[in-house]
Image: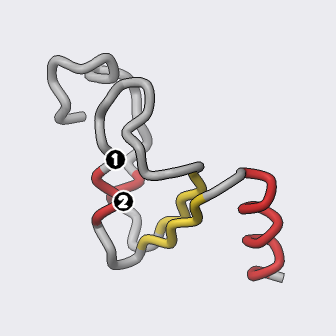
Amino acid sequence: REAEGTPIYGMPILSVDAAPRVIICNYDLSPGYAGVPNPLYSRGEGVFLRLGDAKESLKGLIGFVS
């Protein structure tokens, strides 16, 4: 949304930052192909960050919720 001059500027995004609680499953904290860091990673409060392999992350998340 605010990253002018980057490959993702103007792309449609979900307003996840407006949610009080967010679960993020991602391989690592690197910025990805666009080179733009995700500000949700540093928000802290209300963010559950699950790093690692997607299959293993989802297994763990399902086990936690069950």
Residue 43, image quadrant: bottom left
Q: Which mark is residue 38?
A: 1
Specify whether 51 is left or right of 18: right
Q: At which x and y percent is residue 33?
A: 43, 25
- Characterize the local packing of mark 2: few (<14), some (14-19) or many (20 or more) Cα atoms within 10 angstroms: few
Residue 41, image quadrant: bottom left
Residue found at x 57% / y 60%: 51
Q: Which mark is residue 58?
A: none
Between 55 and 12, the residue placed more toward the observer is: 55
Amino acid at the residue labelled 1:
Asn
Q: Which residue was labeled with disc 2?
A: 41
Residue found at x 51% / y 51%: 28
Q: Say which element carries label 1.
A: loop
Q: At which x and y percent is residue 59?
A: 82, 66
Amino acid at the residue labelled 2:
Tyr
Q: At which x and y percent is residue 21?
A: 45, 72
Q: Are marks 2 and 1 in contact (CB under 8 Å)?
A: yes
* Rendered view: 9 above or below 42: above
Residue found at x 48% / y 66%: 22
Considering the image in quadrants, where does the N terminus appear? top left
Q: Say which element carries label 2.
A: helix
Specify whether 5 is left or right of 66: left
**Spatial CA span between label 2 and label 1:** 6 Å
Specify whether 25 is left or right of 36: right
**Number of labelled discs?**
2
Q: At which x and y percent is residue 3?
A: 19, 31
Question: Which color scheme did the rendering employ for the protein?
Answer: secondary structure
Residue found at x 37% / y 39%: 31
* Rendered view: 48 above or below 26: below
